Amino acid sequence: MADFKKIGFIGTGVMGGRMCRNLATKIDVPVIAYDMNPATVAALADTGVTAAASIAEVAAAADLIILCLPGEPQVRAVCLGENEGGNDGLLVHVRAGQTIVDMTTATAAVAREVAGKFEEKSVDFADAPIARGVSSAQDGTLSIMIGGSAAVFERIKPVMATMGTEITHCGAVGTGQVMKLMNNMIVFANTAALAEALAIGRRAGVDGEVLFETLSRGSADSFVLRKHGMEYMVKDNFPDDVFPVTYSLKDIGYALKLAEETGVDAASARVAQDRLKAAEAAGYGKLYGPVVYKIVDK
């Protein structure tokens, strides 16, 4: 890690907190973190993470700054200072030679816009969204999809390896976001299909666990079936501390916007979006996405 003397981490929520914990315990470089909720940073004190009082403090201390935020508005606020306070984003605090890695799920467009702004200040940028969920963030087995130059990818790869086991260079800045949005779009469509299969199967006399276990042994098998289906949907278990319907709606909205921009009729994605919207309207917005089963089974 000779390139980085200190690493900053901004956004220590449900995913980011777990990722920062893995980073701090597996790397021999000091870590400084900031979150609008100081308690989430304080929870990392046992790993040696230093709490920062502001974004500016992280920027002043770190050579590499990692972001893990809820979505595009937060990326704009943290990077560009586009919020009520204004002028307090990373852009006004960074210095030449630093590297920013954004692990938020947002859009390719904002990644490219932000990268351009940082480039003007001789600061490198990569988008590096993640897949596989909270349990993988916990045990450091995330899939990380990186958009950026080959040189930046090679420089940050050892750091990313503290949080994930699959580190993929997808291409130039923005391609990591494209890859993540396609991943999530397929997950949401698959989840909607599983909800329908479970409802049909049960009403036709097949036990839900038998249904999904049997499907997992055939050509219908998938990660989503084994995770979302067998661990959550069939057990009627929809926790409020994983990946909520509201976040799913955000991501599928980004994916459908990209579909529109590229001229693709993403009909199955729109069906998945409708299921998620119905789940939110029914009061399930804070629950894990497989709760769409409740909508299908009404």
Image (cartoon, helix red, strand yellow):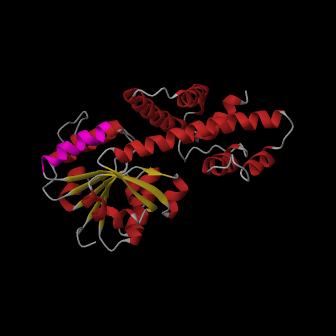
- Please name the residue shown 44% across and 45% down the image: 180
Q: Is residue 69 visible?
A: no
Measured from the top left, where is residue 44 in percent x and y? 41, 62
Q: In the rendered image, which quarter contains the N terminus?
A: bottom left
As displayed, is residue 71 above or below residue 156? Answer: above
Query: Compared with residue 173, is residue 278 higher up or lower down, i.e. above or below?
Result: above
Query: Total marks drawn?
Result: 0
Q: What secondary structure predominates along the stretch shown in magenta?
A: helix
Which quadrant of the view contains residue 189? top right
Relative to residue 12, is residue 134 drawn left or right? right
Q: What residue is drawn where x is 85% and y is 34%?
A: 204
The C terminus, quarter of image: top right
Outermost residue toward the right in this view: 205
Q: Residue 29, position in %: x, y? A: 30, 71
Give percent across and percent down for residue 160.
37, 62
Tell me where the magenta segment starts and ends, as one range: 109-121
Q: Is residue 120 left or right of residue 199?
A: left
Is 98 included in the stretch rendered in magenta? no
| Residue at x-position 24% and y-position 73% | 2
In the foreground, 25 or 263? 263
Residue 41, quarter of picture: bottom left
Residue 281 appears in view: yes
Q: Position of residue 197 (x, y in %)?
A: 73, 36
Indicate yes or no whether the magenta region holds residue 112: yes
Q: Would residue 202 appear left or right of 185 to someone viewing this image?
A: right
Q: Nearer the viewer, residue 56 or 215?
A: 215
